[in-house]
Each structure stands twice: as structure tokens, then as C-alpha cells.
């Protein structure tokens, strides 16, 4: 990793956790009269650049929305090309990721994935499990509602098994049952492609997250857009429902 310094960025006030909805691959391709899968392929190139840039900045947590629980509605052909690209990404990048101390994690229901991508991702998780420079959460077959329902079921099971009492459930305890339990909540959520919605991403975790939207399609999203999102984030006044001290 290199160490480019961007003078507009305040390195003491970086977001700890950045989450990105990688959207707009299909429209990027359509604009070029290419098949949708060409857009997904171009999107993978951006994943490489953005992961590296986030690591260089010294941000510790990055969560990338790669495949939602609703994306199974797409054609078999498209789903299969997305799964193949996941395998392609991991096979090509795993050495670099590992040598850059990136720890790969998955949030979402991995068991429903086809066996090849599932195995590839399990191998990547296992290889990188002791790394700790950048925690890269890949949201795969992820849905925010599914995350919450799963957490509720896991909690109910612990109550059933006598490990906890119902009145012990508070925000912190509930958080422990979410896929993201080891992470701080995202400080900054980025969604390119022009859509102004969450599309079932981290519903519970984004209570006080700052949003950054852009019309750019994901395959055109470069490190300069990431820098811009961070610079904008640093201008925000995060009050968490309180009042600023100086007012
Ligand atoms: C994001 O791009 C990739 C996934 C959702 C897997 P899209 O495929 O949603 O692209 P658009 O939104 O149709 O342009
Ligand atoms: C969200 O994008 C999911 C991912 C980027 C993985 P979608 O393209 O699926 O979202 P909608 O359908 O526009 O809400
Ligand atoms: Mg989309």
C-alpha cells in the first residue's frame, strides 16, 4: 500500500467504518450498449481500488454491499455471473489482500450460496482471520431485515436455553447478535448510482450514520469520489439527538 496524503482530509477525524452500496453496474453497461455482466466486471475493478484506498487512509472497517437477499430475483444468468465474479475477485486479490493485512469477513447468509463461491470465501476468511489492519466485510446474500430477524431468533434461543433473561435485552446485547457485532456502526454510508434509498442494507446499524449519495455509477467510482465523500463527511455536524456545546 502507498501513503498518498490528501491535504483536504483531516486524518485525525476519519470515519472508523465506511459502508458502500455498490450500485449502478447495469446502467453503466447499458449506457455503453454492453451486457449487464460487463458492468459487474468493471465494478470489480473499483472494488480493488477502493479497498486499497480505504486501507491506505487507515480506516479500519469497510463494508461492501455485494449481493442482497433480494438480488436472487434477477435472472439465473446474471446471478451466476455475479457469483463467478466473486470467485474471480477472491482468486486474483487474495494474496494482495492478505499481504496488506486485510481480514475478510462475510455478513449475510453464506450457506445459501453455490458451493464454489462459498468455498472460495470460506478459504479467504480462514486465510486472513488473524489480520487486523482493515476489516473488509462483504455483504453477501445480506438483508437488513434478515439480519435483525436472525438476531432476534438467536436471542430467543439463548433465552430458551436459560443463558439470558428477556429483560437483559438492551441495545448493546441485541447488537451482539447481529452479523456486525464486532464492528462499530458505520460512520459514513456511500451510495452511488443516483438511487436515494437503503435497499435493505444495514437497517439497525445506520441509526446515526451520515449518508453520501452520488449520481456516479459504481464502475466510475474512483478514489477521488471516496476522498470527496470523506471530506464532505468531515463537514457534518453529528449531534446524535443532542445539542452542540457552543450553542
Ligand atoms: C449493483 O449494480 C450490483 C448488484 C446489485 C449486485 P446493479 O446491477 O444493481 O446495477 P443497476 O442498478 O441495475 O444499474
Ligand atoms: C442494492 O442494489 C444491492 C447491492 C448493491 C448489492 P439494488 O440494485 O439491488 O437495489 P434496488 O433494487 O435499486 O433498490
Ligand atoms: Mg441496482
Image: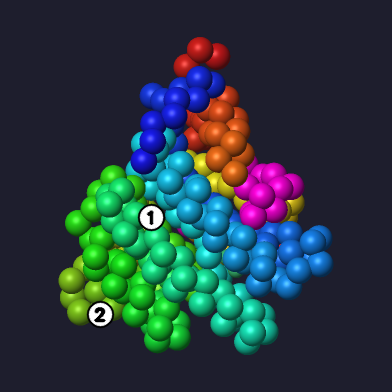
Badge 1 crowding class, 10 Å Cα cut-off, few under 14, some 14 to 19, many 20 or more, is many
Residue in front for this viewpoint, 27 or 113: 27
Quadrant field for ligand 1: bottom right
Q: Residues within 10 Å of mark 2 (few under 14, many from 20)?
A: few
Q: Is residue 230 above or below residue 51?
A: above
Q: Is residue 48 left or right of residue 214?
A: left
Q: How far across and how far down the image is residue 157, in percent?
A: 28, 78
Q: Residue at x 34, y 80 (%)?
A: 119
Q: Quadrant of the C terminus?
A: top right
Given residues 225 and 229, the one toward you in this image is 225
Vertical arrangement, residue 21 with respect to residue 233, above or below: below
Is label 2 in a helix, a strand or a loop? Answer: helix
Going 24% across and 65% down the picture, which residue do you hit?
127
Dot 1 corresponds to which residue? 136
Residue at the (44%, 42%) spot, across then down = 54
Quadrant of the drawing holding the N terminus: top left
User: Left or right: 55 with respect to 206?
Assistant: left
Q: Which residues are magenta?
A: 204-221
In 3D space, how far apart are the residues under numbered discs 1 and 2 (Cα atoms)? 33 Å
215 in the magenta segment: yes
The earlier-in-sequence mark between 1 and 2 is 1
Q: Which residue is mark 2?
A: 160
Query: Can residue 185 be spotted in the picture?
Result: no
Q: Can residue 225 be seen in the rendering of this structure?
A: yes
Confirm or deny contact between disc 1 and disc 2 (CB under 8 A): no
Q: Where 42 falls versus 187 (above or below)?
A: below
* Residue at image point 79% right, 61% down: 32
SS label for mark 1: strand
> What x and y, as percent, mark residue 221?
63, 47
Front-most of 160 and 144? 144
77 above or below 16? below
By secondary structure, the bulk of the magenta-drawn segment is best described as loop
Amino acid at each position: 500500500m502507498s501513503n498518498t496524503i490528501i491535504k483536504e482530509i483531516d486524518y485525525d477525524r476519519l470515519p472508523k467504518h465506511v459502508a458502500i452500496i455498490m450500485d449502478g453496474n447495469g446502467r453503466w453497461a447499458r449506457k455503453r450498449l454492453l451486457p449487464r455482466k460487463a458492468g459487474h466486471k468493471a465494478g470489480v475493478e473499483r472494488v480493488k481500488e477502493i479497498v486499497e484506498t480505504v486501507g491506505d487512509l487507515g480506516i479500519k472497517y469497510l463494508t461492501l454491499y455485494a449481493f442482497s437477499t433480494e438480488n436472487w430475483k434477477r435472472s439465473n444468468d446474471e446471478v451466476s455471473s455475479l457469483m463467478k465474479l466473486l470467485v474471480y475477485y477472491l482468486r486474483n486479490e487474495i494474496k494482495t489482500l492478505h499481504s496488506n493485512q486485510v481480514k475478510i469477513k462475510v455478513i449475510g447468509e453464506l450457506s445459501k450460496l453455490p458451493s464454489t463461491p462459498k468455498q472460495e470465501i470460506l478459504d479467504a476468511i480462514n486465510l486472513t482471520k488473524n489480520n487486523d489492519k482493515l476489516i473488509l466485510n462483504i455483504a453477501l446474500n445480506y438483508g437488513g431485515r434478515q439480519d435483525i430477524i436472525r438476531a432476534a431468533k438467536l436471542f430467543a434461543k439463548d433465552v430458551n436455553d436459560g443463558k439470558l433473561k428477556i429483560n437483559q435485552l438492551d441495545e448493546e446485547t441485541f447488537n451482539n447478535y447481529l452479523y456486525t457485532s464486532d464492528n462499530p456502526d458505520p460512520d459514513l454510508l456511500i451510495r452511488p448510482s443516483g438511487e436515494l434509498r437503503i435497499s435493505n442494507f444495514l437497517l439497525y446499524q445506520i441509526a446515526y450514520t451520515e449518508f453520501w449519495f452520488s449520481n456516479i455509477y459504481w464502475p466510475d467510482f474512483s478514489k477521488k469520489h471516496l476522498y470527496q465523500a470523506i471530506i464532505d463527511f468531515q463537514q457534518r455536524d453529528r449531534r446524535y439527538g443532542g445539542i452542540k456545546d457552543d450553542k
